[in-house]
Image: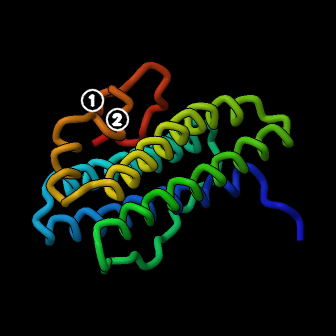
Amino acid sequence: MASETFNELLTRQVGNEFAASHQYIAVAVWFDSQDLPQLARHFYRQSLEERNHAMMIVQYILDRDLPLTIPGVGEVRNDFADVIEPLALALAQEQEVTEQIKALFAAARAEGDPLGEQFMLWFLHEQVEEVASMTTLVNIARRADNLFDIENYLARERVGDGGHGGGRRSGTPEAAGGTV
């Protein structure tokens, strides 16, 4: 079986990013149902960020005049036994996305596609930030004496926005239809 091309992997990544967005909505709703508003707010924002990543890839595909069919997303996990489970799930999801982005970069390089490589560099940088912030959040939750320690940490610290406050930083790819 021949390996997938960069463009095929890119189309699949659109679906992966939308799936991550949906999973983060489910996590946010679970935190909301547990009366943990800071955790819920964090994951609602993470959901929007993943949606924006999908739309950045869509815009890139459109700009390159490549074929695109928007993939569907599968089921998401909605029930968790404790606060650590959804956080650990989010960390594992970010680690998986990192591997997907690394494969995309490698495919672009193997195909001699410097535009694809350049596009993926932003996502590689983004994944370092995502894995680091999710790792910190898991560690904080494991060390917390109670759930309010986690809530206070999130209220006090800027977690997951790289200090950008959700705004568009220099070099950020355009998103089809704009970011939300």
Question: How is colour applied across the structure in the image?
Answer: rainbow
Q: Say which amino acid is labelled 1.
A: Gly
- Residue drawn at (74%, 49%) of the image: 6
Please state, as top left, top right, bottom left or bottom right, where the N terminus lies in the image.
bottom right
Say which element carries label 1: loop
> For mark 1, what is the residue?
165
Task: Please provide percent x and percent y for residue 54.
Answer: 47, 50
Q: Are marks 1 and 2 in contact (CB under 8 Å)?
A: yes
Q: Say which amino acid is labelled 2.
A: Asp
Q: In the rendered picture of this protein, how many numbered marks are placed on residues?
A: 2
Q: CA distance from mark 1 to mark 2?
A: 6 Å
Task: Please provide percent x and percent y for residue 16.
Answer: 53, 61
Q: Is residue 154 found left or right of 15 in the rendered image?
A: left
Task: Please provide percent x and percent y for residue 170.
Answer: 44, 19
Check the image and name the residue furthest to the right. Answer: 1
Label 2 Cα crowd, 10 Å radius (few <14 / some 14-19 / many 20+): some
Q: Is residue 7 found left or right of 157 in the rendered image?
A: right
Task: Please provide percent x and percent y for residue 124.
Answer: 60, 38
Say which element carries label 2: loop
Check the image and name the residue furthest to the left. Answer: 35
> For mark 2, what is the residue?
161
Q: Which mark is residue 5?
A: none
In the rendered image, the vertical position of residue 169 relative to residue 161, given as above or below: above
